Every structure is written in C-alpha cells, then in structure tokens.
Image: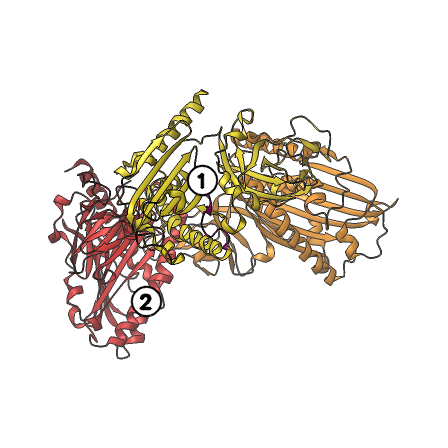
Chain colours: A orange, B yellow, C red
Amino acid sequence: VSYLRNTWYVAAWSDELPPAGMLARTLLDEPVVLIRNSAGAVSALVDRCPHRFAPLSAGVLRGDSIQCRYHGLEFSSDGRCVRNPHGPLAAGLAVKGFAVAEAHRAIWIWMGDASKSDPAQIPDLAYLSAAPASAFSCGHLHSKGNYELCVDNILDLSHTDYLHPSTLGGGAVTSTHQKVTADEQSIQVEWYCANTRPAPLLVSLIPELPPQTDFVTRVRWYAPAVMRLLSATVPAGQAVEQGYVNLNAHMMTPETRASTHYFFAATRNYCVDDAALNARLAETRKHIFATEDMPMIERVQQRMGEREFWSLEPRLLPVDDAPVRVRRRLQQLLAAEATGS
Amino acid sequence: VSYLRNTWYVAAWSDELPPAGMLARTLLDEPVVLIRNSAGAVSALVDRCPHRFAPLSAGVLRGDSIQCRYHGLEFSSDGRCVRNPHGPLAAGLAVKGFAVAEAHRAIWIWMGDASKSDPAQIPDLAYLSAAPASAFSCGHLHSKGNYELCVDNILDLSHTDYLHPSTLGGGAVTSTHQKVTADEQSIQVEWYCANTRPAPLLVSLIPELPPQTDFVTRVRWYAPAVMRLLSATVPAGQAVEQGYVNLNAHMMTPETRASTHYFFAATRNYCVDDAALNARLAETRKHIFATEDMPMIERVQQRMGEREFWSLEPRLLPVDDAPVRVRRRLQQLLAAEATGS
Amino acid sequence: VSYLRNTWYVAAWSDELPPAGMLARTLLDEPVVLIRNSAGAVSALVDRCPHRFAPLSAGVLRGDSIQCRYHGLEFSSDGRCVRNPHGPLAAGLAVKGFAVAEAHRAIWIWMGDASKSDPAQIPDLAYLSAAPASAFSCGHLHSKGNYELCVDNILDLSHTDYLHPSTLGGGAVTSTHQKVTADEQSIQVEWYCANTRPAPLLVSLIPELPPQTDFVTRVRWYAPAVMRLLSATVPAGQAVEQGYVNLNAHMMTPETRASTHYFFAATRNYCVDDAALNARLAETRKHIFATEDMPMIERVQQRMGEREFWSLEPRLLPVDDAPVRVRRRLQQLLAAEATGS
C-alpha cells in the first residue's frame, strides 16, 4: 500500500505558519518541517538532519536558513547546507526538500517528483480566498483513521441524517437519490431534495426560513482528497444561487496509514457581514466534526484494524456509489504512478 | 494458537445488562455487542456493521432492533437487516450473531458453530441463582494476562499462603497434599487439611470460630475456564456441610491473547441473612483480587512477553498437577475441535 | 543485533541499593533483580521465578535469600533454590545469577559467561570513590534512545555549543580540531582550545574567572559504554591541573534496543569543600541532561525508528571521528564475542 505522490496535498492553513515561523508535521509517513521566512516565502524540508537525524524543527531559524539544534549545521530553504561549522560544505550534506505552493489560504505540498509539480494543478478553491473574514472560517483536526475513510465520510452525506440528526442532517439526503457524475479531473455527487424541512442547525440560526425548502448538496472530489462542498437551502422555486448557500472545503492529508490531517473551511452567501454568526457557525461545525465525525472514523478504523478495506468485504449500498468510484479512481492513479505512465 | 469455540463462555453478569440496554465487550479477540430487549431477551452480535464497519454499540436500540449510528441500517437480534433506508433488504446485508443463554445469573455466549450450542452444557452453578441477595455477590475484573494464567491461579491455591497471607491464606493449603481427580466433564483438585488454624479473614469476621478447625478446599474445573470453588472451615470431627462453607465461582473469558475478563461470584451457608457481612466479604474479596491477584498475573504475563508458556520451560512442582492436567485437557479439546472430531 | 555480554555494565549506583534492599531493572532486555543483603553484599538474579515466572522483585527478602511472592520458593544469592515448601529441592529449580562487583560507588554487572568475569577489568574511576561528599554527585536518567546514540552524544562534545549554548557550551569545542587516539583498552578524544571565553555556566559560578582562558576537554571511552570526561578551564599558560578541572563519568547501560540507563557522576578540583556549590552544580547538570540531552536523543531515536544507524546513511563530519571509531570497535568486539575468540 502506498500514497499518491505526484499530486498536491494540503500541508497547513496559511495562518498556521507565521512569518519567521516553523511547523513540524508528519505527512505521508514522512516528518516534514514547514518554514516561512520573514519575507513570507514558504518552504518544506524533510524534518531530519542528514548528519545525525535530529529534527530540524527543534532548531533555530537564522534569516532564510534553519540551523540544526544538535551540531549547528545550517540549511537553506531548498535543503542545501549553507554553513558547516565543523568542516567543508560537501555536496552530500543536504536535506531533501519538497515543492510547495500557497493558494486558497492554504499551503500545498508535492511529495513526489518535484520536476512534475505545477501549482496550476491545485484544485480551484478561489471562493475561499475571495471570502471576507466575516464569512470565512477554517480549521484542522487530527483523525485517527485512514484518509480514505475520511473521504468516504464526505462523499456519502447520508451519514448526516444519522450521525448529526439534530444539526446538519434532517433526513433530506437519505430521502433523495444521488446523482453521480465524473470527468477527467473530478467526481461529483449531487442530492436535490425538493420541498423538505431545512436542516435543524440552519433553522436555529435563520428564524425567517420558510418551513419547507429545497435542499441541494453537491460534493466535487479532486484527487487525492480535496473536496468542494456546496450545500444550499433554497425557497421553493428559486434558483440555487438565491438560496442560503454554504460553500465548504474538506481536505484530507494522510499522516500515517491510520491517521489523517483533516483540513476544513467554510464560506457562505448569506449574512456575509455577520461576524458573530460566522463565529457561531465555525464553532458549531468544528464541534460536530470533533465530537461526532472524528470519533466515528476512529472507531471504524479500530474495527478494521490493520486490515485492508476491501478484504473486509463491505456490504455496499447505493449511497456508496461516489465513494467507490473515488476509491477506484485512486487505485488507477496509484497504478499509473507506479508504472510511470 | 487459538481459542476453543464450541463451548460456553461467560460474556457478562446478568445485572450488567439492563432491559433495553447494550454492552460492548471484546471476547476471543472479536468485538461483540450484547443486547437485552425491553422484554428481557438477550442477544449477541458482532459489534461491527457489515456496511461500513461502524460499531453497532455506538448506535440506538429501536424496539427489538439496533440501528447503526453511521448510516441508519437496522438489524434484528439475530443479525438480519430489517431496515435499510437507502435501498432494498439484500440477503447479504446481515451481521453475524452468536448463540447466547442466560443461566446462573450470567449471560453465556457460544462463539463457534451455533448449531452445536446447547444450554444444557453450561456447567451447573445453580447454587448461584439459588443464593439470597444477602448471601450473594459477584464482580468483573479486567486482567492483563492470558486466561490460562488466570485459571492456573485458581487451580493452585497454594498461592493464597504467599500472595494473601493475612487474609485468605494461612499455610493450610501448602501443608496439605492435594488430591486430583478427573472425569469426562471436569477436573477436580481437593485439599483436606485437618486440625489447622482458620484463615485470617474468617477469624476476623467470625469471632466465635474455634482456634483449630479442619479446612477443606475443592476446585472443580469445566472447560474452558469455569471453576466452582468450595472452601469450608469445619470444627473438628464435623461434616463439611456443618462448617462455614463458601461456594464461589471463578470464570475466565479471553479478551485477547494477553488479557482476560475475570468473572467471580460467591455465596455461603453461614450468616446468610447478614447483608452487612455480605457486603464486607464482597468488598474484601474484590480488593484482594484487584490488588494482589491481578497485578501478579499481569507481571507474570509481562515476564512471559509474547512467548508461549511451555517454551519458557517452567520448573513445575507437585502443586501444578491440576493446572497441568487442565492445560493438557484444553490442548486435547482444541485439537479435537480443529479436526472436527 | 545483539549486546556485548562478556563485559561490565553499570547496573546501579551503590546508594540506590540499601542494605536488605532490592532493585528491579531491565538490563540488555533482561529483567534483573539486584539484591543487597544486610551485611552489604550485592547479588543479581534474573528477575523471574523459574516455577511460574513471577518477578522475584515482588517478593520478600528473608536473610540472605529471596522468597517468591507467588508460591513461596526461596532462592539464595547465587540463584539456588534453598526452600521449596511444596516438595524436594530439585537441581533444576534454580534461577540464573549474574556476576556483580561493587567499585567506584557503582554496582557493576557481567551478563555473559560468569567464569570470564574479572573485576580488575572494570575501568579505573577511582577518582569517584576518592571524592569527598562536598565535591561529588551522581545520578541516573532514563533515555528513550539506543545506548550508542547516548555514547555518540558524549564523544562529540561539539553539540554543547548548540544544544547547551548558555551553560556548558561557548563555542570552544567547535572552534578546535579534536585529537583522537586509541589503545587496546580505550579510545580518547581531546579538544585543546587556547585563549577562549570560559563556558557560561562556569562564569556564572566562579566570579573571579579571567575573561579568557584555555579550555581542555578529554573523553576516554572504555567498552562498551563507560566514559571518563575531563573538562578544564585553565588560566593562560598554566598546567591543566592548575585550572578549574571537572572530572566526570558518563556510563550507559542498554535497557532495550531503544532505551538506555544513563548513569552520570562528577567531581572537581576546585571549591571541594563547598557543599552549596556542589549541590548547585549537580542540580544544574541533571537539569541540562534531562531537559536538553534526553529529549534530543529521544527525538533522534524517533526519527530513526526501527532502522539501523548505518542503513540511514548518516552524512558524517570530522567531529564524528571518535564516535565512528567507537562504533567500529564495538562491532569488532561483538564479532569476536560471537565467534568465541
């Protein structure tokens, strides 16, 4: 089992890494140190000195370079050793670096062949950068489950009706047949539920909501684990854009085989100047993810143990259409990467 | 290494599982959810939804069925899916169930071929159900040791003289040759010590005890790990039944290779209406088991590590006669089960 | 991978084991119980009863023998069973003992062929026993790293300039070429830095220090992991003995592959009657080791994981000369021991 490498993963939210700051994070089983210099530029290195394997993240930033805390070697942002207090600057004295890019309020990392990296391939999440502060929130949670389980969780939103019945779910998704479409870059699943009760959380936040609305949900997945999620509550007969539209992002980066960095963000088209509502929404969502989704995914992982998903012979349902297509697409991409095609 | 499967294990004490209640427990390395419906009937299922592997014990009881918290599938007490909100009730959509029986104030589980299960094979512990509340106690402890180590501990009671010298032991067992007998269903060990000092705990509880008594102890083992224990302190020359007789049960169910559910119960023929004495005895016994036996078994397991008992070449003593016979009987039963004979 | 066995390891400081006392410690992956009888003699046994594998250290000392807590067997200090309450004293009923010796305020253990053990081979650390109480301190820390990483840490003291810049390091070691010498018994590395600033810790303790001094450091290693360390701050032009001389010892005993017992001691030739200074020095050193060295070694071990040091292809520097020679010497000694030569 392996990870897709020639692709972009979210390494951190931009605001997790201040100027002249460092952040250590294990990504795809590898220790990585993210560095932002005082001018704002971001770089990423293997977080292990090539000399004696000390974590560079335990060291000190000196201008654009990072100094190892153990014996003082200094490395530039591309991994070259630029100062060796104990002798000459030998060519082998370097630490592996990764291509990074900053986009859509996040720091992205390419952990494969850097020569193939192209920031233009980062999925378009421009609505995140365009959102005003009063209508934007983002967060990071640690999940004790494989990243594919986390992806499944977003691609089959029927779970909201059972795991979040008093907030995000209200029965609408379960009662609607989903429509799954795919193109070369993405796989999309949509639920269009006419004339249903709005989700309890929205009802509690927006008193003027009509008792019956249309409810539209669209999830678009990009490899390996980036998802745009539109969730719209629409007065009957109106266009989606005229409804209460939440535009979210859910992005998973494997930490290890059995743990995941879960990055999420949200913006919306209603009450965009209401900072108090924004804070309440952000807090509520994070609470739901942390106390309902993460524990469920952790328990599922515990039940699976070390075993591979398919080897457990899951009894799949129609709602698994999108998750299964995504799992197959990932397998194809992994196979293509393995054969170099 | 494997477990005996076509046999009864204690899964829980009856009073651990109230009406319309659930209890999750790992037994023989398998996650199990025990369910009691509102009418009092008990069932047991693999605690893992066949759809996406969520633990059913995280779900909700709906009448006689259990609803998965993740995507809402509902299963009846025999494991059939009785409601699928996302599509038809396919035959494969079922969770494995186990035969269970309730007897002697305990819930018993059969984790092998259910067609071979027969509640009549549950060892006779009728004295437990017959005991009045004021002369009965039971408990459950978690042991960080293999269940065979826990069985050894009961079958060689000479340990009471060294591990519990100020309470249960007084030197009587060590000073007596044990007598081991066996039949097809059980193996029994008996110590008959004439004219000895009663155990310190009994002396402290029963002031009128004579200074010298006979002391009779009998342990009868039934496969795989159920033991009846009679311990009688008898004024010289009287029959066992006329003495102070404790009738206990010690029952071990493997959780994993290196951990065990230890179920114990006690009744007696003296002061049977004395609820205060009953509580004091129950508390004292549980304290002894939890602070003396469990730590010793855990340390022994630590010393053994992953290694198999015999590979460590134990230097066995005459007092190991019964434990060794039981280990061999278990090997024979396992071999017979493996060959289907 | 294995440990050198026909050699002396420090098992404990003498004062860790009072008369009629026991100390349980895992050494070289083996559980060991150290025993001092009431007359002061020390012995060491495998900490596992040969009968049922209970730790003897959970037992009771009875005169010169130790009684197992589980079933009462008693063993003498050489491991013979001297009392079996359950039957005859069979020859096989013995626990393995180890050769021990007490020297230089420490208890040493020989975990190989006892017939080859010779206390004369214990490295000469007589300066430790000779030191007055007001100029001596010693301690024991648990390191979550392989013992060779701990040895590397002492043999390459350039780390003091980066890991301890405000106390032990001041740049002197980095700025000096070390001189490495070897003989049959030991490997020595020396740094002689003329006319430099004394280390910050010494400056803070000795106000009358001149601003520039010579700084001499010598580490002498004896297999497998015993090091004498001399560190002298010498007014310019004077002999080393006339300076402020610290004489330390750093001794590592493997607990497991990835953890180490770190024993350290210190004496000095200045202010030898100043008990307050002695206490302050002892506390400061232990704090530095516990909060700077141990965490760094633990992090390095985490970065290495289960992998062998050389397989990670470390980019070694001139300062690694002594550590590498020591690693090679250890390999030669291990190979010699394996072939019995």
Position of A122 relative to C234 (above/below): above
Crowdedness of circle 1 by 10 Å Cα count: few (<14), some, many (20+)?
Answer: many
Q: Which residues are magenta?
A: B257-274
> Which image quarter is the C terminus of chain C in?
top left
Marks 1,2: beta carbons within 8 A: no
Q: Which of A107 and C85 lies nearest the eye of the viewer? A: C85
Q: Amino acid at mark 2?
A: Gly
User: On residue A255, which mark appears?
Assistant: none
Q: Which of C231 and A284 lies nearest the eye of the viewer? A: A284
Seen as rendered, the residue at the extreme front is: B237
Q: Chain of mark 1?
A: B
User: On residue B252, which mark appears?
Assistant: 1
Q: Which of A183 and A42 lies nearest the eye of the viewer? A: A183
**Residue at 53% in and 47% down:** B132
**Residue at 26% in and 58% down:** C263
Residue C280, x across and y down, in percent: 30, 73
Badge 2 marks a residue whose secondary structure is: loop
Residue A287, x across and y down, in percent: 65, 54
User: Can residue C221 be seen from the camera position used here?
Assistant: no
Q: Amino acid at mark 1?
A: Met
User: Can residue A24 be seen from the camera position used here?
Assistant: yes
Residue C81 part of the magenta segment:
no
Badge 1 marks a residue whose secondary structure is: strand
- According to the image, label 2 marks what residue? C170
Task: Tell us which disc is closer to us: 1 or 2.
Answer: 1
